[in-house]
Image (tube, rainbow, N blue to C red):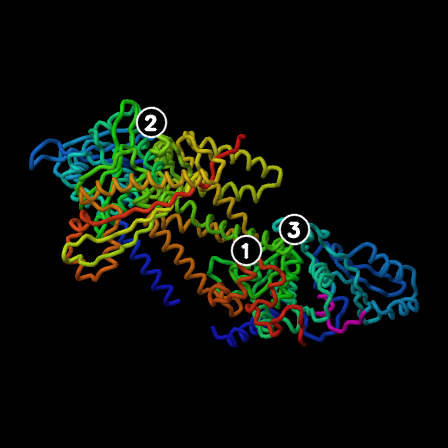
Amino acid sequence: MDVFAKIKHFFVAGEQEVTTVKEPEKNEHPSLEHTIRQFENSMDFIHRTYPQSHVDVIYLAYLIGNDQLLQEIIRPFTDANEEEVKTVLSRSQYVVVVDSKECINGILNGKAAVFFRGSTYLVDISKPVGRSVEQSETETVISGPHDGFVENIGQNLGVLRQRLKSAHLKFVKLEVGEVAKNVVVVAYIEGLANQEIVDELIRRIQLIEYDAVTDTNMLIQFIDENPNSIFPQFMTTERPDGIVSKLIAGRVAGFVDGSPSGFTCPTDFFDFFSSPDDYYQRWLIGTALRVLRFIGFLITISFTAFYVSVTTYHYEMIPHTMLLNLTESRAKVPFPPLLEALLMETTIELLREAGARLPTKVGQTIGIVGGIVIGQAAVQAGFTSNILIIAVATSAIASFVIPSYIMSASIRLIRFGLILMAGILGNLGLLMAIGMVVIHLAGVTNMGTSYLTPLAPINFKDMLDTYIRGPFWALRSRPTITRTSNKKINKMRK
Amino acid sequence: MNINKRLLMMMTAVILLLTGCTDQHIIERAGFVRTIAYDLSGEGENTKLRVTVSIPKSNHEDAIVYSTMAESGKKAKMIFNRHNNRRLVNGQLRQVVFGERLARRGVWSNMDTLTRDPSIGSRLHIIVSESDPHHILIRNDYPQGPTAGEYIDTLIRTEAKAGEIPDTSLYTFTRDYYDDGIDPVATILKEEKESLSVDGIALFKNDQYVGKIEAEDRMFFALLHHGVRAGDLNVSIQSERDLEEQATLEYLSSKRKIKVLSTRGIREGRPIQVALRIKLSGSLLEYIGELDMKKPSDQRKLEAELEQTINRKCQKLIDHMQEKKSDPMGIGQYVRNSIPHSVWKQLKWEEVFSKADISVHVDVKIRDYGKMLH
């Protein structure tokens, strides 16, 4: 679709929205009656009046903090005469608003609107809604910082500022969602990030047409180039140190208010296999961990499929002693290997999904029960062969080695396709399926860069920090994927 | 987008078209032939083959053995298939055993079937049996291993690993069979009361079993035929100290070099001159004799004596091979490389080989003589 048509469509749609909801025209002076009309029928809407001083205060009950309310509203206005109110309102935290829309937005953001003698003031009495900084549960590391992002964007940006004390770090605030008006912040380091990428990202976020965008992982699906691809195309993380290292490399980050994760771009496929932990270990250990993850990836997508193809077609490939055991175990199973494998894979996916949905304590019980049922009983009952149990369990475990949960979920789904192809055409089918995945990966782009960088297009320098985690003395340049103008590390040319 | 669509259509077509012609071998529905034995069923020109197959059961202990007379191996397989409840497949074939009578007549017609079948791996062991191969397979009371197939497999493997016998796989056999200037060899097995034993090495001329290297000479043959990695060599030395002394070199490793010294007058039938240099070193872990191994001079002396004895043994083996006109050492290859191809093509190599003047030079080094106890 033509970009301009899209933009135009966006604005037209926006205007229609304005006319249908009975919102005031812009630049209309805020009035008490109008504001009350906007919020009526909502139980959290509070309207306080101070008759002796003709002050009306409007705020939303659950957005404000009691201390702030006491200090900014109740103490100054209770038993105050008009003169005293005048001096109070001249203080700097009381901001005059002349736009009724701005007034309503302010109330929605946890401010109190003070109506006094025809003029309106906004004062911030909001209390941050959300939890304190905790460890990220989806991305844990053993060594290194343990804090994760929280749902409050202000807190997240604060954490980022604390870690990256640079005046070049810029935040751009955007609004997304016709109804919910979620705040999205794009962060980048001026001079390091490629301005074209920043502009393009902002443009794409502005083009989003949706009622509410409640999470970063949701946002990135609106702005990626291949919406039908199975792979996530923007790296998301809940770890501030992860975002900081990406920003310093010249990437652009983004946050959605209300979401504990941020995203970075441009992203390549191999980004999803690196964890901040790699950099806190000695480089050889970090390298070994990365290689292990790639092995895990291969095992996840192909181990069960390989079992199916070998037991169905390529008995020659099995070592003789193992073959006899396998035959004995398979002889009790009434299903062909393909069906057997699909059954087991589905079972383990059920188990995983149940574990994810249930409260932690019940989840553990499910794990134990499932483990016993799948591990022992299924084999004894002649439901599956024991080698398949090993294959399925290994590939399930291997899938959790991948640090990004979103990527690991994608890979687990691909596995089913591979198993199917292996069951139909054996190793030929397996290779065809892997070939198709690779072809697809090579076609995916993210912010204009190839998803398979630095493999295709090949770049040996970048490989030092992709397939292995090179020693810090060797990592002298920022990745080319970011298209940064400051290629050398530790030098910032402005 | 367009390419994706085309690819998708192609994939769908391939999947739909190929599902009809799968060759599924779901493992529990297949019977894996582990060992196959060929022998002649009787005397005479038109006698049939006697084919025996051994299929191990999944309990690791028993094997199903079928035996029949047939014109060819594949025909026999069809007969066996009529008996067996699982389809017989060749993909797990590990050994082929040829009876001595068949081996003397020529094994290639059967070998050809094996090399053609793509499911048969090239690491299949080629074995010549002096006893009835059918009986070797049908026995399952070997204390060393539950089934004959597994027993033979492990036996050959361990022997070949140390380099004491040549690794006679389907690959090496066919390679040497087709190659110019070298003849294949195979391991000879013999049935004993309680076990099977490696009874030597079969020398082939083309595909015919013509001669035998005795089991006690197999290490010397190994020195001539290829390099040894970690073998044991026992040598009885006839020393001038009028006693027969015994020396055993263990963890022996050797290297063999062949040099063609002279090919002059090869067309006129003059014998060619070839030098074989064998370098070997090992730990002297057994020495029953009078020399004092602590003295370096005595060590040198023993080394020289060992060299002489090994030299004599090797020379004898070479004479035997020349007599049988079988050249498993591949001397012909070296000769071929040192003369013009046109000359080689006119040459009758087996005749030239049988008359060739092959000298052996052995260089023994005693690496150490074991733990020092005193």
Inter-mark Cα distance, 2 to 1: 48 Å
Instruction: Select label 1 or label 3 by which is in front.
Output: 1
Q: Are marks 1 and 3 in contact (CB under 8 Å)?
A: no
Residue beneath label 3, please?
Answer: A136
Chain bearing mark 2: B
How far apart marks 3 and 2 lie (CA) works out to 57 Å
Do callouts 1 and 3 point to residues on the same chain?
yes
Q: Closer to the camera, B53 or A97? A: B53
Q: Quadrant of residue B93?
A: top left
Residue B32: numbered disc: none
Specify the amino acid type for callout 3: Ser
- What is the CA distance from the residue labelled 1 to the residue labelled 3? 17 Å
How crowded pointer 3 is (Cα within 10 Å; few <14, some 14-19, many 20+) is rated as some
Residue interval drawn in magenta:
A95-105
> Which chain contains the residue that carries disc 3?
A
Examine the rendering and report whether any part of residue A206 can be seen. yes
Q: Which residue is mark 2?
A: B146
Nearer the observer, disc 3 or disc 2? 2
Tag 1: amino acid: Phe
Residue B163 screen position, x and y as percent:
35, 41
User: Where is mark 1, residue-wise?
Assistant: A273
- Indicate yes or no whether the magenta region holds residue A102: yes
Image quadrant where residue A368 sits: top right
Q: Are marks 2 and 1 in contact (CB under 8 Å)?
A: no
- Which of these two is toward me, B104 or B18? B104
Q: In the rendered view, does A188 fall on the left or right side of A75?
A: left
Left or right of A77 in this view: B168? left
Helix, strand, or loop for circle 3? loop
Query: Which amino acid type is shown beneath numbered disc 2?
Result: Pro
Earlier residue among tags 1 and 3: 3
Q: Residues within 10 Å of mark 1 (few under 14, many from 20)?
A: many
